[in-house]
Structures are given as C-alpha cells and as structure tokens.
Image: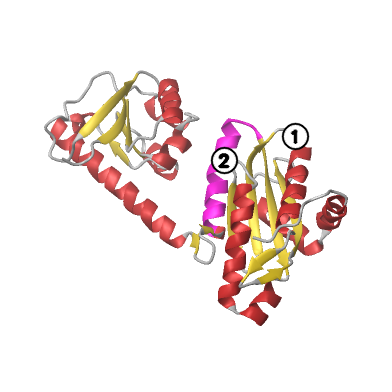
Amino acid sequence: MSTPYQVLLLSPGSPDLATSPFGPFVLHACRTLDEAAEALQTQTYDAVLLDLQSPSGAAALLGWSGLSRAALDSAVLAVLQTPTPAHCLKLVQRGVRDILSPSDLQPDVLGRCLRLAIERKQLDDTARRAYSIDLSTGLPNRQQLQEHMTHLLALREREPAAMALIALQLDGMGAVEASMGVEAANVLRRKLAVRLRASLRASDVVASLGGDLFCVLLAWIDAQEDAERVARKLLQTVSQPYLVAGQTLPLSARLGVAQYPAHGKEARALLSRALGQVSGDGISRQLRGAAANDEVPPAAD
C-alpha cells in the first residue's frame, strides 16, 4: 500500500475519499484559516484544501497571512463560488495550484484534483531543485536565493520583522584554482560552505553565487547591530586556514550587509546593496579591524 497523502481540510463537510483510486488520503480537519495557519506550523501536508464558498471567500484567502507558507510547502487548492478572473489570477500568482467549483467536491472528482495537484507540486519542486543548486557546493544558487527572499519578503509585509543579507567575497580563491586546479578549489568552497552553515541558525540560508561569492540570509534579526555581529563572526570563521590536499590554505574575505526594511523591500535591491558594499569595501575594513582584535583559535579543516 502506498503512503497516504496528508491533506489539511478546511470545509463545513468532510468528503468521503476512502475509496478514491487516486489516494489513499488522510484528512486533517480545521475550522478557520487561523487554525490552518497553526496546523501548518506544526506539520507538513501534501495538500491544503480550503473550501471558502462565501461571497468574500476569495478576498479572505488573498488576505490570509498563511497563504505564502502553505503554498511553499503544500499543493494548495481553493473551492470558491464564482470567483472573478482577477481573483483567480491573483491566487495563482500567490501559489494556489487549482481553483475548484463546489461541484468538484464530488469524491471521484476531488480525489483526482488533489492527486494531480500534489503530483504537479512535487514535479515543480524537483525541477526547481535541479536548476537552483550550485553543483560545486550543494548550496542554493542566486536564483534560489532570490526566490526564497521574495517569499520571505512577502511574508514580512504581513508579519513585520527585520532581516538582513550578508554578502561575502573571498580573496585567494582564484590563486588556489590557478595553482592547485578546479577540484581543489571546489573542495575549498565546500569546506567554506560547511563552516558557514555550522555558524548559523537552521532558519538562515547560505547560498553560493558562483566563484568566490557567497551570501547569507538572516531570516530575522532583533536589532540592526545583530547583522554586523553575525557578519563579524562569519568573517572570523571563514578567515581561519583550510587544509586541502595536504596544504594549509589561508583565505580572507570582504563583506557587505543589507538590511530589511532600512535598505530596501525587494530581493534585487537588497542583493544589489550587499554586493555593492563588497565591491566598495565599505563595511569590510571596519569588520576586519574589529575581527583582528578578537582572539580566534587557528583552524585547518
């Protein structure tokens, strides 16, 4: 028997999907959009089915703060009574996979719609991962970073919280590649990626922009000073020696920091500012000077 598909259901009724050939499905009922948002924080679902047939159903769904989170993790289907074309387009742009009519709640039709939406979501996620990973490090690439930032910024518009983007450019990577070869340079990049990931929270994102450029997205910060504190910590971490092919290799780094909302409210603007600071070396000198006064044990991994 195949693994059951977990479906979060907001509906006044409970469709009988026990015999659907497109299943098996396990339905988890909730009564309101707020309850759905709470459920999504504690469990991942294959699909989210939202039966909102009231005249204001489409507007309520568009105003739901949990929609971005739901669409990121699950195949979202909405049941609406005569939605306008404008509402349909906006919902699809927000990540809704399918918009059903009340007649589609018949078990034979609903089972098919759920299963196809789940399959499309899984295929899209697989394709996105295939094209969004930097192969030399296994980290998200620029495209995936910007996509993740866009989703997170949309969430921040509804649930305000500060966040920050740190860009790092490594000095010395080109010399390693020239003297030791591409594979040695890739080993060095992977070691750097491990160090960055180990220095951050699980909610933060490390991305490789190719070559000697990396970015760190801090999903939230409590104060402006937190971003520079983390940047200083990362500078110390990446500047310790690396052991590659029996050789101890030193690296240094330049950093740039962009903060939301102070420096922009769009992914491209924040990325441009952080990379611009790296090129101009504005914050890097200050951080290098501060880091030079901190005692950090030598490392060679």
**In terms of depth relative to the viewer, which is nearer, 62 or 175?**
175
Q: Are marks 1 and 2 in contact (CB under 8 Å)?
A: no
Mark yes or no: residue 86 visible: no
Where is residue 273 shown, x and y percent of the image? Answer: 72, 54
Q: Against 33, is 133 above or below?
A: below
Image quadrant in which the N terminus is located? top left
Inter-mark Cα distance, 1 to 2 = 17 Å
Crowd rating for badge 2 (residues with CA inside 10 Å; few <14, some 14–19, many 20+)? few
Indicate the quadrant containing the C terminus: top left, top right, bottom left or bottom right.
Answer: bottom right
Q: Residue 56 sits in which quadrant?
A: top left
Question: Callout 1, which amino acid?
Answer: Ala
Q: Which amino acid does label 2 sit on?
A: Ser
Q: Can residue 70 be seen in this view?
A: yes
Picture coordinates of residue 49 (x, y %)?
Answer: 31, 31
Q: Please identify, in this view, whether the residue under mark 1 or under mark 2 is nearer the observer.
A: 2
Residue 17 in the figure: left or right of residue 141: left
Q: Is the magenta stretch mostly helix, strand or loop?
A: helix
Q: Mark 1 points at which residue?
A: 223
Residue 293: image location, x then y, percent: 88, 50
- Determine crowd level at label 1: few under 14, some 14-19, many 20+ residues with C-alpha closer than 10 A: few
Question: Considering only order in the chain, which callout, 2 or 1, is on the residue closer to the N terminus?
Answer: 2
Element under disc 2: loop
Q: Residue at x 32, y 36 (%)?
A: 47
Q: What residue does disc 2 label? A: 203
Q: In this view, does 49 lie above or below 12?
A: below
Segment colored magenta: 143-161
Count the numbered circles shown. Answer: 2
